[in-house]
Every structure is written in structure tokens, then in C-alpha cells.
Image: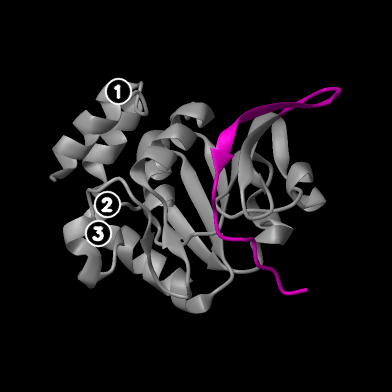
Amino acid sequence: MSNEKLVEYLRNAGYIKSSSVADAFISVPREHFVLERYKKYAYVDNPLTIHKSQTISAPSMVAIMLELLDLRPGQKILEVGAGSGWNAALMASMIKPGKVYSTEIYPELAEYAETNIRKAGVKNVEVITSDGSLGYEKHQPYDIIVLTCAAQRVPEGLFTQLKLGGKLMAPLGGFHQILTVFKKNKSGFEETTHGGCVFVPLRNHT
């Protein structure tokens, strides 16, 4: 399957609803972010293994997340868990001239993500090797914070780094999780849930 066929499938299946998400998928091909031995599966709607027992998410799951975030040009995003770099690159293509700061606890994966992002020609992403559960205070507050790894609960420090009116998305739970979005308002947070998902667990240095 080609990238164009994948996008057509995701549109027909209702995962991609907006032209902005479709354009991101077309401009940031998944093949740049998978291991060489899995290139032939780059446009199949399945997760694939990368380094350190981590995965690149299925395209349908990524599309669901991007649609829920409703990204806008000029936004500033914190991603916890760079992984392959694909999600960061997709978001970055949607928010130009904004910027994505993507944290990754494994140095090998951070380097892999950065290489893939550059290979795809995306320039407005900074990959940081750090414990993402602590956030990244240097560029707070963020319009959007996205966890691409599962947690029983959102680390408190991440909420404090979110801008008023901003969104935080996280897969919450144990082996099976619920995709959860928190919107920050003056009185606290509005929480909505968006179905089941399975992500690798959040790692930290504690």
C-alpha cells in the first residue's frame, strides 16, 4: 500500500476527518520512521516495533489523536515520548511556524527520532533526551501536551506546564488504557474520554 492509499483508507474509515490531518500524513510519510526491515509494512494500519521494545503507533490511532487535538498554526507543543519521531513530525507540519519539543528518556531512541525527523525534512521539532514525566520547563507554558506512552495518572508537573485553554492528551490505565483529554480552564480541568487504546508504559528515572 502507498502513502496515498493509506490516507484514502483512513479517510474512508472515518479516522481522518480534516484536510489538515490528511495533508500532514501526505507531507510526512511513515516510511521515514520505521526500521529498514519493516519498510514494506510502513503503510499498513498496524503498530510496528522500533528500538528498545518501543513501537510506532498504528496510523489510525495517530489520526484519532491528531483530530482530537485540533492543532493550529503557531502553537507550542510538548510531547512526552519521541519514539520514532513520526508523531512529533506530523504535529510539527500542522503547527508551522510553531514548534514541537519532544522528550525521550532513551538516548538511542532520541537520536533515532531526530535522524528520522531530519530525513523527513521537518525542521520545527527539538528532541530532548530527558525524563518526560517531569515535562520540559524551559519552554513552558504549552498550548498542547501529548503523552505517547501510558500512565496510571498524569504526572502533576505536566498540568502546571499547560497554558490556560490548553489541552493535555494521555492514554491512562494499565495494560489497556483510555485515551483521555484534559482541557485547562480557570476552575481546573474539563476531562473527556475517547475510547480504548494500548500504548507502551511511561518510563522515568525514579
| The magenta segment | 183-206
Residue at image point 45% right, 72% down: 109
Closest to the observer, 46 or 85: 46
Q: Which mark is residue 180?
A: none
Residue 181, above or below 161: above
Q: Which residue is mark 3?
A: 32
| Labels 2 and 1: the sequence-earlier one | 1
The reply to whether callout 3 and callout 1 are in contact (CB within 8 Å) is no
Q: Which residue is mark 1?
A: 19
Q: Quick check: can you spot residue 96?
A: no
Residue 175, above or below 192: below
Q: Quick check: can you spot residue 192?
A: yes
The reply to whether callout 2 and callout 3 are in contact (CB within 8 Å) is yes
| Labels 3 and 1: the sequence-earlier one | 1
- Confirm whether the magenta stretch covers residue 195: yes
| Number of other residues with Cα within 10 Å of mark 3, as a class: few under 14, some 14 to 19, many 20 or more | many
Residue at image point 27% right, 52% down: 30
